[in-house]
Image (tube, rainbow, N blue to C red):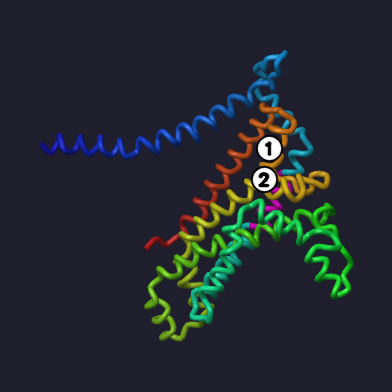
Amino acid sequence: MSEHKGSMNRVYGWLLLLPAMVFLTAFTYYPMVSTFFVSLFSDGTATRPSVFVGLENYQFLLEDDIFWKVLVNNLWYAAGTIPTSIAIALMMAIWVNNRLPARGLVRMAYFTPTVLPMIAVANIWLFFYTPEIGLFDQIGSVFGFPSQNWLGDPELVLGSIIVMTVWKEAGFFMIFYLAALQSLSPELEEAAHLEGASRWYIFRRITFPLLMPTTLFVTINAVINSVKMVDHLFILTKGGPDNASSLLLYYIFEVAFSFLDEAYASALTVVLLVVLAIVAVGQFTLMDKRIHYR
């Protein structure tokens, strides 16, 4: 009887996993394998069918100056958005978790950019960055600063995109930190205060270590967001000027849908997936030892 019950439980467990396995296979694993397969062939046309070329697309990738420029752009973009948005989100969460007047209004103000559609955000910041008539130039003119072409200057455009991204993402990450802070036992902080610990010591030794599971989750999301930017670039810069604001996923979009080179776009996608896999493994390897699960 017990053996029959155990086998039924195993069948029941596999049936529960089946929908997730079907969707993962259909929409994650199969597209990944298919993309790698396509990257090994040339791009076919109506008059010239695709042929097997092996690693030729990857060799062309190594010689593609635009790819390397876009990759460097993406590294700078990630370096500018990930730590900044996480740090600001944590500070905002600590601030709104305290007993301050109009706490609900402040939380709503911080979270509002997150719920705005990406296209709406891009158009709002397009107005901010417009030379001479934009909000930033209008404010700068009051203090005597000259007009700046924020989205047309190769030296300024990537930084402008980073500022907009941090503005949108910090409120989203704040929600996770706020939920984590509210789940912490207040007795821990009270005991530390009784021992004479400072607020900074409590945060460094108690609060932040207990927030590490949330930090890992937020960091993974921030890394994913740093390589999936397409919508804002399409509205604001289209990767210009001279690819100064083009990022890896936007370049893949251009190659696939503007240049209609499916094979090379597949090779770029495989490289992107490999980079993300390496980063994910590094995150779990480096941060797992610092995580304290309750």
Residue at horizontal 79%, vertical 38%? 65
Question: Which residue is rendered at x = 53% and y = 78% of the image?
Answer: 102
Determine the image quadrant of residue 153: bottom right
Asked if labels 1 and 2 touch by Cβ distance under 8 angstroms, the answer is: yes
Residue 208 placement (x, y as % from top left) = 49, 68
Residue receiving disc 2? 230
Residue 228 among magenta residues: no
The location of residue 272, given as percent across then percent down, is: 62, 39
Q: Residue 119's x, y, as percent?
A: 66, 51
Q: Identify the element where label 2 is drawn.
A: loop
Q: Describe the element under mark 1 as helix, strand or loop.
A: helix
Residue underneath mark 1: 253
**Which residues are drawn in magenta?**
71-81
For label 1, count other residues whose C-alpha is less than 10 Å away and answer few (under 14), some (14-19) or many (20+).
some
Using the numbered discs, state the Cα–Cα distance from disc 2 to disc 1 in whole angstroms: 8 Å
The residue shown at (30%, 36%) is: 15
User: Left of 139 or right of it: where is 289?
Assistant: left
Please state which of residues 62 and 97 is positioned toward the viewer in this rendering: 97
Asked which quadrant contains residue 18, the reply is: top left
Three-letter residue code for mark 2? Val
Looking at the rendering, in which quadrant would you find the N terminus? top left
